[in-house]
Image: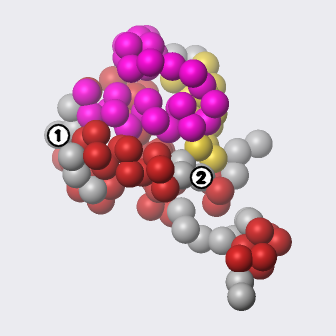
């Protein structure tokens, strides 16, 4: 079961479920590839101004971090099969996990071990 507090999420695309994991590295890759901050990405998404190439740049590192060995072309095919609305929802779900991340709730002893 995915734990959003740990950056884990299950994405439903084209009738299949994919595990994605959001880490700081994934966030940096997304922001670099898209050329804007996560907050700006969310704004573009809400305004309907996010391009399909930008959605691909968001989905690919999240899916790879979840353990799926895919290339951009394969993620593009997943997006095509899923359709625009499912792809937009998946990107929104990823951004939602990113905005909610950083909270140690759900990390139990791991969070306590980081305290000095």
Neighbourhood count class around disc 2 (C-alpha, 10 Å): few under 14, some 14–19, many 20 upward:
many
Q: Is residue 55 left or right of residue 104?
A: left
Q: Position of residue 73 (x, y in %)?
A: 38, 13
**For the point 34% across and 28% down, which residue is it?**
56
Residue for badge 1: 49
Nearer-the-camera pick, 1 or 27: 27
For the record, the magenta segment spans 53-82
Residue 17 in which image quadrant? top right
Residue placed most toward the observer, 102 or 83: 102
Quickly name the residue at label 2. Answer: 7
- Residue at point 31%, 49% (across, down): 31
What is the quadrant of the N terminus in the image?
top right
Based on the picture, tell me whether residue 116 belongs to the magenta stretch: no
Give whichever of 92, 65 is nearer the camera: 65
Residue 32 placement (x, y as % from top left): 28, 46
Is residue 18 placed above or below 26 in the rendered structure? above
């Amino acid at each position: 079961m995915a734990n959003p507090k740990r950056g884990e999420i299950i994405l439903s695309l084209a009738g299949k479920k994919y595990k994605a994991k959001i880490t700081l590295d994934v966030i940096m890759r997304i922001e670099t590839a898209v050329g804007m901050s996560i907050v700006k990405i969310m704004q573009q998404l809400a305004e309907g101004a996010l391009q399909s190439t930008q959605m691909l740049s968001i989905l690919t590192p999240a899916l790879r971090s979840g353990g799926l060995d895919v290339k951009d072309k394969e993620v593009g095919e997943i997006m095509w099969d899923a359709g625009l609305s499912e792809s937009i929802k998946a990107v929104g779900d990823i951004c939602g996990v990113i905005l909610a991340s950083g909270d140690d709730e759900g990390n139990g002893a791991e969070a306590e071990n980081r305290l000095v």
